[in-house]
């Protein structure tokens, strides 16, 4: 289904290939592909095709209010992460470092449990210019208890501190397992910390990566919707915040350290993610069940760790439980092991023949090395993606990517990690994007592509059946 014409890419990653896929029974499931990063008490580098280029971050921990004893442990943890992951950490509590010239060498600035008013007007202006020039911000714990009278900072952090109960164990619900800060986690993360309540809910302005289950601990006051980690694009820069990190012990936890590493890598521009706000989506595959899905053709998918991984083929796993009609948006996360092949199909009629999707629908491709109209982000055989935009948004094999496939009328827009990379309009009277099913492909032996967190938003027109 593909030619082997090599196209130079930033990385060998692809989306959806021009074929179909199949689902293997859960009872026969094989082990899932390894996480993009793993840990066994040590801090390991992401399992990317190559190490990140060397870069620098500034850790700022000045306090004008309560001072956390964990700051020193936090600096040590960040230095350890830097030594293992090719970035240099400069740590300071000197606000005079906040000038344009001094900030320019840093890919990201980490506010590590800062409190109160820590920058004067000129320093605030310099930091605003740094962010607007593409700089990164990472806020840890009491960074939300900082600069209440500086509106720019409040928007950057996403939400500011209101109160907290005593330190205790709670269940963290991981909402986004594609972002590098959370891709190593399961759907639930049990840990002990001081859990902040916030003055506002950041969900409308940020992509919530994780939230607290308020029924799992005492003292939450956010009415059951309690974000605790999030990311956002903000006025030209990138902002990541996590509410964890109060306790000294937090910074010895491998999972929490890996969480911080992912936030730093994203804020510094080393990895891509869709950090646009997301509301209104309904899950088609939540990682626990394949109810409603059917296999068409040979091969299939294994289900492990909330992840569907292709095997054999050529086949397709399609969602028979709902036909999409009218305007809609489909989002899903995908990961390639290497130079593999798969794809996402839209707009095909119900059928257990995988070729029905090929002949009657459209496929958004996942394939690192093929001709432009048959590589990642292309509408297979019909329209190439914007290759430069695609390469800029693409994460390498071993790391997760997120697609949004947005259908408006007969127009299909493809977003990769929040960046638009393709815009295609169907003019074939035999095909229609406005009515049909969704499917994911298992292309063949050796084409190992994984999927998780498949969801849909109906955006107008007829409701899905």
Image (spheres, rainbow, N blue to C red):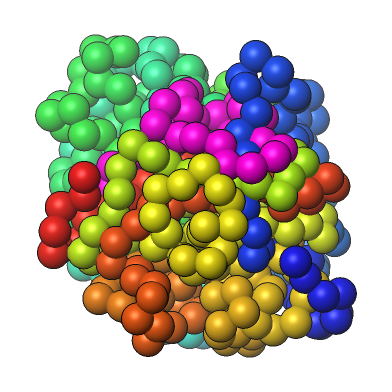
Q: Position of residue 462 (x, y in %)?
A: 14, 59
Q: Is residue 411 left or right of residue 280?
A: right
Q: Quadrant of the C terminus?
A: top left
Q: Is residue 340 left or right of residue 332?
A: right
Q: Position of residue 112 (x, y in %)?
A: 49, 47
Q: Determine the residue positioned at 82% across, 60% down.
A: 339
- Counting every numbered tag in the picture gives 0
| Residue 51 shows in the view | no
Q: Is residue 254 left or right of residue 340?
A: left
Q: Position of residue 422 (x, y in %)?
A: 49, 81
Q: Determine the residue positioned at 30% across, 22% down.
A: 213
Quarter of the image where one finds residue 228 = top left
Per the rendered image, the range of residues in magenta is 281-309
| 305 within the magenta span | yes
Question: Against 243, is 364 above or below?
Answer: below
Q: Quadrant of the N terminus?
A: bottom right
Q: Determine the residue positioned at 34% across, 71% down.
A: 432
Q: Determine the residue positioned at 31% across, 13% down.
A: 216
Question: Against 318, is 274 above or below?
Answer: below
Residue in front for this viewpoint, 275 or 293: 293
Residue in front for this viewpoint, 148 or 87: 87
Residue in front for this viewpoint, 212 or 405: 405
| 108 within the magenta span | no
Q: Is residue 278 left or right of residue 57?
A: left
Q: Position of residue 288 (x, y in %)?
A: 47, 23
Residue in front for this viewpoint, 337 or 299: 299
| Residue 302 shows in the view | yes
């Amino acid at each position: 289904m593909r030619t082997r014409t090599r196209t130079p890419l930033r990385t060998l990653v692809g989306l959806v290939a021009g074929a179909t896929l199949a689902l293997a029974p859960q009872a026969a499931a094989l082990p899932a592909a390894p996480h993009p990063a793993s840990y066994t008490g040590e801090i390991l580098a992401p399992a990317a095709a190559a190490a990140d280029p060397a870069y620098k971050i500034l850790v700022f921990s000045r306090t004008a209010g309560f001072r956390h004893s964990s700051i020193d442990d936090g600096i040590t943890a960040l230095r350890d992460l830097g030594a293992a992951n090719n970035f240099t950490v400069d740590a300071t509590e000197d606000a005079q470092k906040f000038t344009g010239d001094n900030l320019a060498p840093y890919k990201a600035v980490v506010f590590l449990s800062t409190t109160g008013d820590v920058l004067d007007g000129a320093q605030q202006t310099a930091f605003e210019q740094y962010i607007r020039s593409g700089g990164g911000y990472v806020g840890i714990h009491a960074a939300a208890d900082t600069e209440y009278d500086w509106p720019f900072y409040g928007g950057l952090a996403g939400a500011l501190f209101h109160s907290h109960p005593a330190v205790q164990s709670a269940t963290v619900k991981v909402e986004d397992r594609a972002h590098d800060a959370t891709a190593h986690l399961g759907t639930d993360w049990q840990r002990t910390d001081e859990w902040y309540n916030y003055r506002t809910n950041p969900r409308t302005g940020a992509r919530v990566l994780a939230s607290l289950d308020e029924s799992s601990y005492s003292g939450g006051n956010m009415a059951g919707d309690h974000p605790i980690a999030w990311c956002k694009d903000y006025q030209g820069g990138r902002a990541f915040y996590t509410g964890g990190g109060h306790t000294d012990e937090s910074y010895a936890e491998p999972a929490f350290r890996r969480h911080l590493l992912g936030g730093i890598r994203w804020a510094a521009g080393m990895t891509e993610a869709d950090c646009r706000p997301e509301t209104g989506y309904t899950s088609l595959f939540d990682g626990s069940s394949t109810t409603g899905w059917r296999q068409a053709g040979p091969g299939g998918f294994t289900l492990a760790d909330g992840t569907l991984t292709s095997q054999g083929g050529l086949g397709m796993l399609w969602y028979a439980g709902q036909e999409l009609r009218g305007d809609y948006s489909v989002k899903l996360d995908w990961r390639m092991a290497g130079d593999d092949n798969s794809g996402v199909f839209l707009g095909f009629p119900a059928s257990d023949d995988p070729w029905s999707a090929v002949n009657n629908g459209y496929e958004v491709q996942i394939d690192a090395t093929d001709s432009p109209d048959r590589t990642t982000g292309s509408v297979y055989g019909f329209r190439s993606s914007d290759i430069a935009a695609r390469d800029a948004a693409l994460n390498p094999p071993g790391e997760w990517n997120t697609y949004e496939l947005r259908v408006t009328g007969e127009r299909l827009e493809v977003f990769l990690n929040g960046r638009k990379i393709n815009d295609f309009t169907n003019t074939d009277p035999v095909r229609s994007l406005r009515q049909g099913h969704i499917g994911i492909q298992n292309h063949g032996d050796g084409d190992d592509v994984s999927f998780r967190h498949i969801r849909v938003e109906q955006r107008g027109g007829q409701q899905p059946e």
